[in-house]
Amino acid sequence: MAARVVSLAEIKEENESQGIRVNDLINLINHGFDVSDAFVLTQKAYSDFLSHTNLEKKVRHLLTSGASNFVDKHLRQAEIPKNLIDEILKEYKKFGTVLEDASVNVYFSRFSDSPIQKIGGDATLLEKIRELWSGRLEGGARLLDRRGENNTILVQKIHYGKHGKLRPSSKFINTIHSLSDEEIIILENLIAKFKKLFYLPHEIDFTLEKGKVLINKIKPETHVALQNSETPETHYKIIRNSAI
């Protein structure tokens, strides 16, 4: 039987069904980069959610019978099957400690979807996953079109180090944190290694933690939003290593 919930570290090969965010992280791992801890809810998990709730059939019936005003009620009442909940929480518990639940970002494995940021606790995590899956059936006219969309969900641990973004093409780092010379060298080395793997320019979302840089996600610069960030940033131009 196909896996429904799997640690990112256990996925060895890229696959179209996993979505581009997951595949990017797998590609990075396979080339020796460190990435933030994460686990994946596969298309199989989503299919089992629909089968358990009979949700798609109910929504279709309501839409065709002219009772679309009852759709939201069914979406709110949809429940994740118990055995799937157990699998999700088993992976989630690996991120935290006995005394503290980990905070995570949760999002579909696509560039077009923004993450549900900084959530923590069993109940909150399960509710956000349910909302994401149920939300795929919102909007009657779009229901038929969504069957072909990728519904893989990535749950990624938030590591509390120094967070920022950098662009290898311009050797520019954006962060709210002050960086030491040693930390800038670590990022210089990351850029040099990254540019050997990716020809097209990307933006790298990273966290520096205990002397190691973790990649949270990468995004082609053509997908990067042009609007200014609301968070004040400190800008570092990497110039020492002219070979980069």
Image (cartoon, helix red, strand yellow):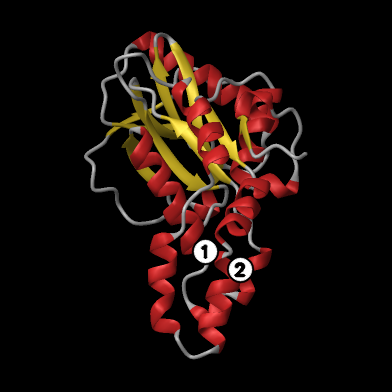
Q: How far across and how far down the image is residue 1, in percent? A: 78, 39
The residue beneath circle 2 is 146
Which residue sits at x=34%, y=56%? Answer: 227
Q: Are marks 1 and 2 in contact (CB under 8 Å)?
A: yes
| In the displayed structure image, the side of residue 38 where residue 23 appears, left or right | right
The residue beneath circle 1 is 136
Which residue sits at x=68%, y=47%? Answer: 44
Q: Secondary structure at mark 2?
A: helix
Which residue sits at x=48%, y=60%? Answer: 134
Q: Residues within 10 Å of mark 2 (few under 14, many from 20)?
A: few
Position of the C terminus, as image quadrant, is top right
Q: Secondary structure at mark 1?
A: loop
Q: Amino acid at mark 1?
A: Arg
Is residue 163 at least partly visible in the picture?
yes
Q: Residues within 10 Å of mark 1 (few under 14, many from 20)?
A: some
Q: Nearer the viewer, residue 12 or 137?
A: 137
Q: How far across and how far down the image is residue 110, in percent? A: 57, 52
Is residue 113 at least partly visible in the picture?
no
